[in-house]
């Protein structure tokens, strides 16, 4: 068992049998709870009647009960549910783990499962029991509500000591009336284990704890602090990702860059550079002629430097392009007479 495996400290001894014989579900006694209404399988009770609660006769002790089991050789093993209740009769023969969920186990715990391997749901029960919801924020998912607290001058220290046996406690808060409190763990797996281990337990012998999942903290200050914490964590994660060399993932796409450029107010940054028009490549002109570019047709034409005559065709070479209008050059408005264009000594005469 590696150091990241839960229960590494107890790996030197086998797990202890917590009870001699495993106990099954309590038998239904119609005298104590006569049937009334419809039986609700989700809450394990009949509608309209509260489920009877009695103090648990067993309690898990990590110091004396934890140890290695057959489950340490199975990479898919979960924490033993009955071990958390203090009533596993298998001991070292158990196929699950008899230890606290911590280290690598807690860090890699799937969102859809709790530390006991039970499936979690998007919604939770109305009484905030069961396995909890995976849609709540991370702080609420690892926070327990503890009701039924007896009067005590230092209840916060008592809760931190009692619940600290199951994992690292991050924060403890007791209400002003002292009847209920909240315990927040550093890892969700610790809260899941503690909820089962402390169910129907007692702090001082006569009290009976009511441990449930905490509701969302609607306090404005707590909500603002939680939002700021999430934003800071997101910024730190993105910065860390960029520093790790994932430049391609961090660089904004061309579409995002274009949207950012369009949304930039005028005068707040350098003006965008206009694209330079493509410079046409003019063909060489014979002696006494100059080649120019016609922006309307996109074609080159030639101008006689002596007479100012303009023509589409290269002097002494063929006829103009079919359908081409007279070029808008220095000799605009002049027509070109091509009757003698077949002659080698003349390329055309301008006529009005």
Image: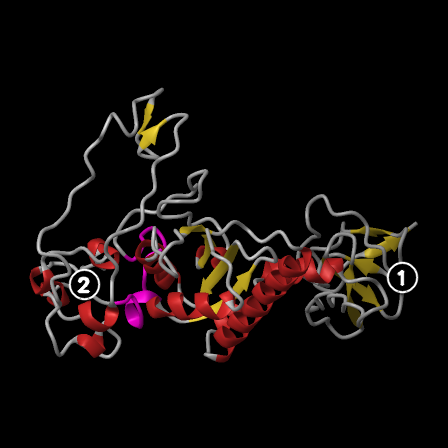
Residue range in magenta is 100-115
Q: Nearer the viewer, mark 2 or mark 1?
A: 2
Q: Residue 97: which disc? A: 2
Residue at 68% x, 45% y: name it: 322
Residue at 39% x, 33% y: name it: 50
Residue at 31% x, 45% y: name it: 54
Earlier residue among tags 2 and 1: 2
Percent position of residue 43, x then y: 35, 35
Q: 43 and 199: which one is in front?
A: 199
Total numbered circles: 2
Q: Residue 330: which disc? A: 1
Percent position of residue 97, x then y: 18, 63
Q: Quadrant of residue 220?
A: bottom right
Farthest-out residue, right = 352
Farthest-out residue, front = 206
Percent position of residue 112, x then y: 34, 50
Real-space Cα separation, disc 2 to disc 1, in angstroms: 97 Å
Q: Secondary structure at mark 1?
A: loop
Residue 101 forms part of the magenta stretch:
yes
């Amino acid at each position: 068992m590696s150091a990241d495996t839960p229960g590494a400290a107890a790996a030197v001894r086998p797990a202890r049998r917590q009870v001699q014989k495993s106990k099954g579900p309590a038998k239904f006694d119609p005298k104590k709870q006569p049937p009334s209404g419809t039986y609700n399988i989700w809450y394990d009770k009949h509608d309209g009647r509260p489920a009877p609660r009695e103090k648990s006769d067993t309690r898990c002790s990590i110091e004396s009960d934890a140890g290695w089991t057959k489950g340490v050789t199975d990479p898919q093993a979960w924490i033993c549910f009955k071990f958390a209740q203090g009533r596993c009769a298998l001991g070292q023969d158990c196929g699950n783990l008899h230890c606290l969920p911590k280290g690598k186990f807690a860090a890699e715990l799937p969102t859809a499962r709790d530390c006991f391997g039970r499936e979690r749901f998007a919604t939770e029960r109305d009484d905030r029991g069961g396995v909890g919801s995976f849609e709540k924020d991370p702080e609420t998912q690892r926070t327990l509500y503890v009701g039924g607290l007896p009067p005590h001058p230092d209840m916060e220290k008592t809760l931190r000591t009692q619940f600290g046996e199951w994992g690292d406690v991050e924060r403890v808060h007791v209400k002003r009336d002292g009847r209920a409190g909240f315990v927040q763990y550093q890892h969700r797996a610790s809260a899941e284990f503690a909820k089962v281990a402390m169910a129907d337990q007692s702090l001082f012998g006569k009290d009976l704890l009511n441990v449930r999942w905490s509701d969302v903290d609607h306090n404005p200050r707590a909500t603002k602090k939680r939002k700021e914490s999430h934003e800071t964590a997101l910024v730190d994660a993105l910065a860390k990702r960029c520093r790790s060399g994932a430049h391609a993932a961090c660089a904004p796409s061309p579409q995002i860059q274009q949207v950012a450029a369009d949304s930039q107010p005028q005068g707040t940054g350098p003006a965008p550079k206009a694209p330079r028009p493509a410079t046409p490549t003019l063909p060489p002109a014979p002696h006494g002629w100059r080649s120019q570019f016609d922006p309307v047709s996109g074609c080159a034409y030639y101008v006689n430097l002596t007479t100012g005559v303009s023509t589409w065709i290269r002097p002494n070479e063929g006829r103009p392009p079919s359908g081409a209008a007279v070029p808008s050059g220095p000799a605009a408005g002049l027509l070109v007479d091509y009757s003698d264009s077949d002659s080698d000594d003349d390329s055309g005469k301008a006529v009005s």
